[in-house]
């Protein structure tokens, strides 16, 4: 009796090499996909990173200016003045604000605007208000967000002496 089963074809060993070569172009199509995706996503990542940097700079500047205004108000509330010493008192308040901001290299104290207001309320209660304004410029120039604006902080304290 003859075996009617179909026998498996016998391929030479070089067939496997040829079959790999035939499949290689399909794999080659996917070879540069990661690089293309990275090239597409990289600008977005850079913009997000620069935005985070700007937000960090903005936060740091706002806190530093608030601290400087508070420092000037503390000096003003602790050191009373009269009409003869008011110019020296204003200079002392301004110097206290500049000293607070000069500790950081991120600020140019010549760009500061410092406004000192002294009010005497009924009963002799004295309040001092120190307003500090500093120009801030962002790293990213955007069409829909402002690129430069003024940071302004005000501190009000009651006169102690």
Image: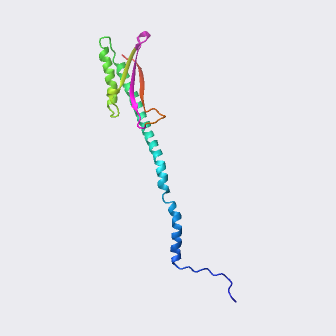
Task: Based on the picture, tell me whether residue 80 belongs to the magenta stretch.
Answer: no
Image colouring: rainbow
The quadrant of the picture occupied by the C terminus is: top left
Q: Could you say which quadrant of the image residue 126 lies in?
A: top left
Confirm whether residue 108 shows in the render: yes
Residue in view at x 68 percent, y 84 percent: 4
Magenta stretch, main secondary structure, is strand
- Front position in the image: 40 or 58: 40
Q: Position of residue 22 (x, y in %)?
A: 53, 69
Q: Position of residue 148 (x, y in %)?
A: 42, 31
Q: Is residue 122 above or below residue 41?
A: above
Q: Position of residue 42 (x, y in %)?
A: 46, 48
Q: How many marks?
A: 0
Q: Is residue 5 above or below residue 113?
A: below
The quadrant of the picture occupied by the N terminus is: bottom right
Confirm whether residue 159 shows in the render: no
**Farthest top residue in view:** 123
Residue in view at x 60 percent, y 80 percent: 9
- Front position in the image: 31 or 96: 31
- Front position in the image: 105 or 127: 105
Task: Based on the picture, tell me whether residue 130 belongs to the magenta stretch.
Answer: yes
**Farthest bottom residue in view:** 1
Q: Is residue 148 above or below residue 18?
A: above
Q: Is residue 24 above or below residue 70?
A: below
Q: Which residues are magenta?
A: 119-140
């Amino acid at each position: 009796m003859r075996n009617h089963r179909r026998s498996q074809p016998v391929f030479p060993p070089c067939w496997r090499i040829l079959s790999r070569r035939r499949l290689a172009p399909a794999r080659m199509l996917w070879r540069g996909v990661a690089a293309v995706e990275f090239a597409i996503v990289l600008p977005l990542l850079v913009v997000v990173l620069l935005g985070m940097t700007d937000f960090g700079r903005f936060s740091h500047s706002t806190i530093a200016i608030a601290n400087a205004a508070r420092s000037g108000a503390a000096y003003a509330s602790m050191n009373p003045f009269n009409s003869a010493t008011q110019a020296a008192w204003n200079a002392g308040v301004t110097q206290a604000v500049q000293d607070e901001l000069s500790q950081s290299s991120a600020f140019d104290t010549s760009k500061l605007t410092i406004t000192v207001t002294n009010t005497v309320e009924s009963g002799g209660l004295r309040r001092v208000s120190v307003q500090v304004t500093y120009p801030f410029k962002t790293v990213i120039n955007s069409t829909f967000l402002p690129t430069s604006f003024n940071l302004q902080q005000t501190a009000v304290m009651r006169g102690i002496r």
